[in-house]
Amino acid sequence: MRAERISRWLIAIPMALLAIATIYPMVYAVNIALKDRREYVLDRLGVTTTFNIQNFVDAWNQANMGRYYLNSIIVTVISVAIILILASMAGYAISHLTFRGSRVMFLIILGTMMIPFQVIMVPFIKLMADLGTINTYQGLIIAYVSQFLPFTVFFMASFYSGIPKEITEAARVDGNNLWGVWGRIMLPLGKPALLSMGILNALFCWNDILIALLVMQSPDQRTVMVGVSALRGQYPDNVPTYLAGVLLVVLPLVVVYLIFQRQITAGVTAGATKG
């Protein structure tokens, strides 16, 4: 009994320290963002007493955050929708359909997951420029779909492989074609995995800086993460305003995760254990 308690403490203490290390930066950022410049200079680590909300107003108005938010929302929603539709179709085909080259196709998808974006960055931007998609929503959407689709296809194929083929074969016997089986059987059964992948891909697209910085080179076309990164240059001596802008960007991610954390965990666990 005593050994069991000791083992629990040995697990609980590192996890508690990890939780503190994760939460502290957010608490620190909130505390600094609520200070005015004078209080920040005089006491950086102390708890704020001014609660200066004006920092958030300045970060939103002067950094054009409204425009950046709109750009990110448009690109993220469309990119995630395309990724989920294509990944669901490909996952169904790879896991339940037998056709020539299916195994090779799956290996190619796995191979693309191993290639860092930095390796293909130069030819990718050259291709985007040749296609005339620099500084366009289409260009950034194509970039996100091409980068995040392979992992989503792999995940959906792993999830769908846990669905017995007898179900899809019975649907075919009942008169459904491939589209009917996908729409009536695979999509409803794949909702947990699709929800998890939708949330994760939305976070990936929202958090991205490198791809968005390369494709969206015009200031008006920046996404919210690129815009908040530029705040550091605009306010080099006004850290509270800069951190207020960071919090404006991070807040939607925190809210989404708090709302959908169970779905994310359940979907990832299901995708990891099926196959």
Image: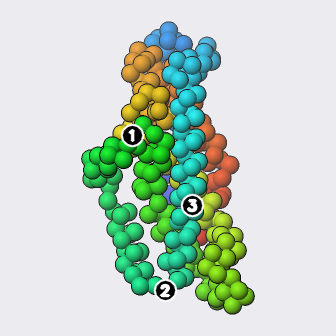
* Mark number displayed over residue 113: none
**Quarter of the view holding residue 159:** bottom right
**Mark positioned earlier in the residue sequence (2 or 1):** 2
- Camera-side mark, 1 or 3: 1
**Quarter of the view holding residue 249:** top right
Res. 15 in view? yes
**What is the distance, in whole Å, between disc 2 and disc 3 at their CAs?**
22 Å
Tell me if mark 3 has few (under 14), some (14-19) or many (20+) residues whose alpha carbon lies within 10 angstroms of its own: many
Residue shown at 58% from the left, 35% from the top:
70
Q: What element carries label 1?
A: loop
Task: State the count of labels.
Answer: 3
The amino acid type, in three-letter code, at marker 1 is Ile
Residue shown at 59% from the left, 70% from the top:
270
Q: Do the residues labelled 2 and 1 touch (CB within 8 Å)?
A: no
Is 93 located above or below residue 165 in the figure?
Answer: above
**Mark positioned earlier in the residue sequence (2 or 3):** 3
Residue annotated with mark 1: 134
* Mark number displayed over residue 98: 2
Relative depth, front residue between 262 and 65? 65
The amino acid type, in three-letter code, at marker 2 is Thr
The amino acid type, in three-letter code, at marker 3 is Leu
Q: Where is residue 162 in the image (x, y as percent from the top left)?
A: 58, 79
Residue annotated with mark 3: 84
Relative depth, front residue between 108 and 246? 108
Q: What element carries label 3?
A: helix
